[in-house]
Image (tube, grey):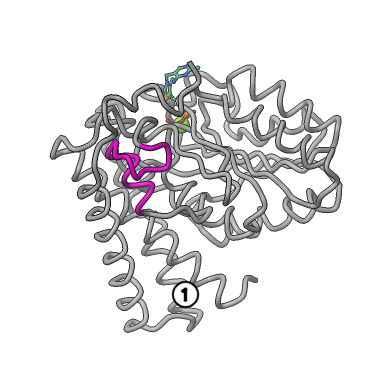
């Protein structure tokens, strides 16, 4: 069982992600966000439960749905928001946007718009850890859709044969854009694929922070002790559409309603209260602090300048 401090920290993180994402959605509606967005609302327990097991010097790799991963790994809300708003004060000086946020100082190796592309980067980081002989670990996040990519299979096999310290975290939200998992896979549990590579695979309730925390705790422990990778599948659901204003009409109404009832935030709050770890007053105070921090991030972002046209070719590879 995590310490009280850890439990509260995870609760704070899921709230930070939720409020942040709701704000991004609002700003998108006001035409303040260039490009597109993929919101993490509904999936917060995965990032929070995984990252609560990581040290600052451990690594993560992310996806196109990456704001929550960044925040859970300790990114500065203001710089994440500024980047999403395309401002000069953002993580990539406003040139990367929502899908390219990285912060090496906290081990966040980057989000990516290319589905499945973060997985081999996680394995590369695992290999670097091995070569440098440290006891760091890396958690690679990816979706159910990405687990059908060749990169998933090749990466997981390589990590397995070399016993690299990688935790493969599959966020199975049942859909890849409008495609339901059952249409493109004959299996129900993606974690079953671990068997093919000779590593442990576990399926957990991805809307239960504690379940995610505990599965990751075991995987991190194994990875730190040279016992190799683990595949953790977290069953979860995105509350909103795939991106932008996707109305997600391909999802049955009853299914959406069922999953809304399993919202990770009220569930975890109730659990903490039942465990007598959080009073009603403490919960309110904590949420107010989070709301203020998100508002501050919005103020910082919206008041920051855009990069100047003459800086367009600075800090890019071309
Ligand atoms: C290589 C590649 N193929 C296709 C796309 C278009 N695309 C963007 S997101 C997405 C679905 C990804 O689904 P999943 O991995 O389950 O992640 P989720 O969006 O559900 O979080 C697709 C097909 C892409 N960005 N990159
Ligand atoms: Mg998916």
Is residue 40 rendered to the left or right of residue 272? left
Please say whether residue 136 is one of the residues in the magenta stretch. Answer: no
Disc 1 on helix, strand or loop? helix
Is residue 82 rendered to the left or right of residue 28? right
Tell me residue 310's x, y (percent).
30, 25
Residue at disc 1, CB closer than 8 Å to ligand 1: no
Is residue 180 rendered to the left or right of residue 206? left
The 10 Å Cα crowd at callout 1, few under 14, some 14 to 19, many 20 or more, is: some
Tell me residue 35's x, y (percent).
28, 27
- Name which quarter of the figure residue 139 lies in: top right
Eyeballing the image, is 189 above or below 116?
below
**Quarter placement of the N terminus:** bottom right
Relative depth, front residue between 261 and 49: 49
How many callouts does the rendering have? 1
Tell me residue 222's x, y (percent).
80, 51
Relative depth, front residue between 99 and 173: 99
Name the residue at 20% across, 50% down: 303
Is residue 247 rendered to the left or right of residue 234? left
Q: Which residue is mark 1?
A: 272
Q: Quadrant of ligand 1?
A: top left
Eyeballing the image, is 5 above or below 31?
below
> Where are the magenta residues, as a range?
78-93
- Name which quarter of the figure residue 262 lies in: bottom left
Tell me residue 265's x, y (percent).
39, 61
Name the residue at 24% across, 60% down: 295
Residue at far left of view: 30
């Amino acid at each position: 069982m995590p310490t009280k401090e850890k439990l509260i920290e995870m609760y704070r993180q899921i709230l930070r992600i939720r409020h942040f994402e709701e704000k991004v959605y609002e700003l998108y509606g006001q035409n303040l966000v260039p490009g597109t967005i993929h919101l993490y609302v509904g999936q917060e327990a995965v990032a929070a439960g995984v990252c609560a097991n990581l040290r600052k010097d451990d690594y993560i790799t992310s996806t196109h749905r990456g704001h929550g991963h960044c925040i859970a790994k300790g990114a500065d809300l203001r710089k994440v928001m500024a980047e999403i708003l395309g401002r000069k004060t953002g993580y990539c000086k406003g040139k990367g946007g929502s899908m390219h946020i990285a912060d090496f100082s906290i081990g966040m190796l980057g989000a990516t718009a290319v589905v499945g592309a973060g997985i081999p980067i996680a394995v590369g980081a695992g290999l670097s850890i091995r070569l440098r002989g440290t006891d760091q670990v890396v958690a690679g996040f990816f979706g159910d859709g990405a687990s059908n990519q060749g990169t998933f299979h090749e990466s997981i096999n390589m990590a397995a044969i070399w016993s690299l310290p990688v935790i493969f975290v599959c966020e199975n939200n049942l859909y890849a854009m409008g495609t339901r998992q059952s249409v493109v896979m004959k299996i129900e549990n993606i974690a079953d694929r671990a068997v093919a590579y000779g590593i442990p695979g576990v399926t957990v309730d991805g809307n239960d922070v504690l379940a995610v925390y505990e599965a990751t705790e075991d995987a991190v422990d194994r990875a730190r002790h040279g016992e190799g990778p683990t595949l953790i599948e977290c069953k979860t659901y995105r509350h909103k559409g795939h991106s932008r204003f996707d109305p997600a009409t391909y999802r049955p109404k009853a299914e959406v309603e069922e999953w809304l009832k399993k919202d990770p935030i009220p569930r975890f709050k109730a659990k903490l209260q039942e465990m007598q770890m959080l009073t009603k007053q403490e919960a309110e105070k904590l949420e107010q602090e989070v709301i203020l921090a998100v508002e501050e991030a919005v103020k910082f972002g919206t008041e920051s300048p855009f990069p100047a046209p003459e800086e367009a070719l600075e800090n890019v590879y071309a």
